[in-house]
Amino acid sequence: VSAKEKKRWTLNDFDIGKPLGRGKFGHVYLAREKRSNHIVALKVLFKSQLQQSQVEHQLRREVEIQSHLRHPNILRLYGYFYDQKRVYLILEYAAKGELYKELQKCKYFSERRAATYVASLARALIYCHGKHVIHRDIKPENLLIGAQGELKIADFGWSVHTFNRRRTMCGTLDYLPPEMVESVEHDANVDIWSLGVLCYEFLYGVPPFEAKEHSDTYRRIVQVDLKFPPKPIVSSAAKDLISQMLVKDSSQRLPLHKLLEHPWIIQNADPSG
Ligand SMILES: COc1ccc(C(=O)Nc2ccccc2)cc1NC(=O)CCSCc1cnc2[nH]ccc2c1
């Protein structure tokens, strides 16, 4: 289903399959586009709920942002259509499912798997930043796994163009960098912080600043209270990379292109991503 055809999609163009999950604004179903037999994920959003939460403009902006993003590690939004009550998003289907379920199952990933994922996410973020899009919500719940095992950034519910930086608190705090916790101006370097948090969680199975109370997590983040547990055994190269990303001063964080040259990535990431 290429977005080139500016055709008007309707529900009749699809056979609807099993439910894939329920998001905040609606349900997602496996679906097959009848003419091409192409398998997609169809996300159904209720207009009433979008109106209630005043997110229609955010959805419109997001569809606009997404329609220009083409990257193997970014879940595609092929198009959308609507009827009386609902808005339908035609999304890429990631055949190997949700990354966080895989992380829960494995407890933590090998250094090779973690480095491969981190490198592919870094390439996706370099691509986004090149288009002045910062994602700001990189966490396991927003990552899916494609048919070849490749990682896909899957949810842009909070992405913004860098020119209008809204500071809306969204979801878990674990991934928020100090400047967002202290809600000061922030820039694309927020994604480097989140990628560092993610790399830590891939290797240890828990995020670095996790605490029982929100207030404790806040404090640990703004103090960058970074500790590496004795188990599982993690290489010093991995710890070095994480320590260069989880830096309070966002301008001092390791730039993404430097990350791709870091010894731990060079030695462990599978080049195909
Ligand atoms: C590019 O992606 C997206 C773009 C936009 C939105 C969205 O809802 N935007 C929004 C909504 C309302 C207000 C403002 C903005 C969501 C996504 N992405 C997902 O929702 C991921 C899981 S759905 C797909 C999918 C695929 N492949 C799978 N394999 C297993 C499960 C699964 C699930």
Image (spheres, rainbow, N blue to C red):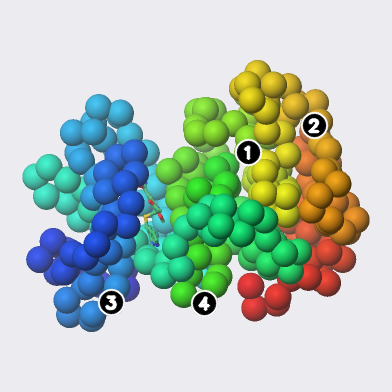
Inspect the image, locate mark 4, and give the three-letter code of the amino acid beneath it.
Answer: Gln
Dot 1: element: loop
Alpha carbon separation for disc pair 4 and 2: 36 Å
* Residue 18 seen: yes
In terms of sequence position, does the residue under pointer 1 or pointer 3 come before the other?
3
Callout 4–callout 3 Cβ contact below 8 Å: no
Inspect the image, locate mark 2, and give the three-letter code of the amino acid beneath it.
Answer: Val
Dot 4: element: loop
Alpha carbon separation for disc pair 4 and 3: 17 Å
Callout 1–callout 3 Cβ contact below 8 Å: no
* Residue 185 seen: no
Q: Is disc 1 surrounded by few (<14), some (14 to 19) or many (20+) residues within 10 Å?
A: many
What residue did someone put label 3 on? 38
Q: Residue furthest top?
A: 215
Q: Which mark is residue 148?
A: 4
Q: Which mark is residue 224?
A: 2
What residue did someone put label 1 on? 175
In terms of sequence position, does the residue under pointer 4 or pointer 2 come before the other?
4
Camera-near label (4 vs 3) is 4
Q: Which residue corresponds to the image point at 85% horizontal and 51% vertical from the top-left?
A: 239
